[in-house]
Image (tube, grey):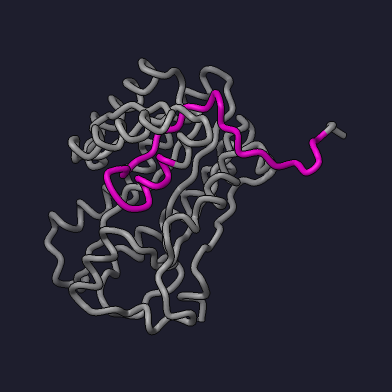
Amino acid sequence: MNDFAMPNVSTDLTGQVALVTGTTSGLGERFARVLADQGAKVVLTGRRTERLDKLKAEIEAAGGTAHACPLDMTDTDSIVASVDEAERVFGPVNTLVNNAGIPDAQRAHKMSHELIDAVFDTNLRGPYVLSCEVAKRLIDKELPGRIVNISSVGAFRYDGNGAALYSITKAGVVRMTEALAVEWARYNINVNCIAPGAFSTEMMDGMVERIGDFSQNFPRKRFGDPAQLDSTLLYLVSPASDFVTGAVIKVNDGQGVG
């Protein structure tokens, strides 16, 4: 048996290079701040460059290390270029958080082909391509890694109120997690997934504006605060979860499990 610490828990990410997608708002922004706070060098990605620059400045002002890198998850060349840039600035990416995603908020038969492509590419194809790009470089260098995919409780329950494709793609993220965990276990790359319930974010605020405060339908009648995901994220990227791969952790406050 190895001589593990007692308890075997640490959130020190010193030496880690983390690429986080969708950091211009919401959960992705919070994830980037948390990882940087724990010592990781964080590559901030998204399409709104002014927000990336602002977040970079705030992380550095707080004593962290970050680099802003524009990224379009629907563009394969952009995905590959982002990993190239991350390696050039910080070295090999050994922590990936696939957070970027968009909702469809429409009935399936009313969606344009352009929106269908955008949802598939952003929510599922893009994360798959990015995961493969990061993994193959780690495998070539014989380095371990951590990949955390962000799904949704919508992957497990859909009530027919719109956003069917969102539910489908998020279910795909769950299966992608499980399959790639097996694929890359031999290379010491752990692939896990967080399935959040409804959290207070910019995207959620927009939904509330459109349809009202639906949190009153939840068991605890509240939305989550992004800070309530910190411990789950840190567990999945830290040494304590070394034996955990292919897991899907629902952080949903009892929502969507009936």
Placement of 198 over or under 179, stated as above or below: below
Specify whether 140 is left or right of 235.
left
**Image spot of residue 15 (x, y percent):** 54, 23
- In this view, 159 is above or below 248: below
- Residue at 14 percent across and 71 percent down: it is 110
5 left or right of 31? right
Q: Residue at x 42, y 34 (%)?
A: 132
Q: Give the camera-side residue of 179 and 251.
A: 251
Residue placed at 41% from the left, 26% from the top? Answer: 65
Is most of the magenta stretch helix, strand or loop?
loop
The part of the image, by quadrant, that contains residue 56 is: top left
Q: Position of residue 61 (x, y in %)?
A: 36, 30
Which quadrant of the figure contains the N terminus?
A: top right
Residue beneath the point at 20% across and 52% down = 117
Residue 112 position within the rendered picture, expressed as x and y whole percent measured from the top left = 12, 62
Q: Residue furthest right?
A: 1
Please state the extent of the stretch shown in magenta in the rendering: 4-33
Residue 30 magenta: yes
Horizontal side of residue 144 vs 36, given as left or right = right
Reply yes or no: does residue 91 show up in magenta: no
Question: Would you place residue 47 above or below residue 170 in this image?
Answer: above
Instruction: Choose top left, top right, bottom left or bottom right for residue 31.
Output: top left
Q: Position of residue 85 (x, y in %)?
A: 32, 21
Question: In terms of image quadrants, where is residue 73?
Answer: top left
Camera-side residue: 257 or 234? Answer: 234
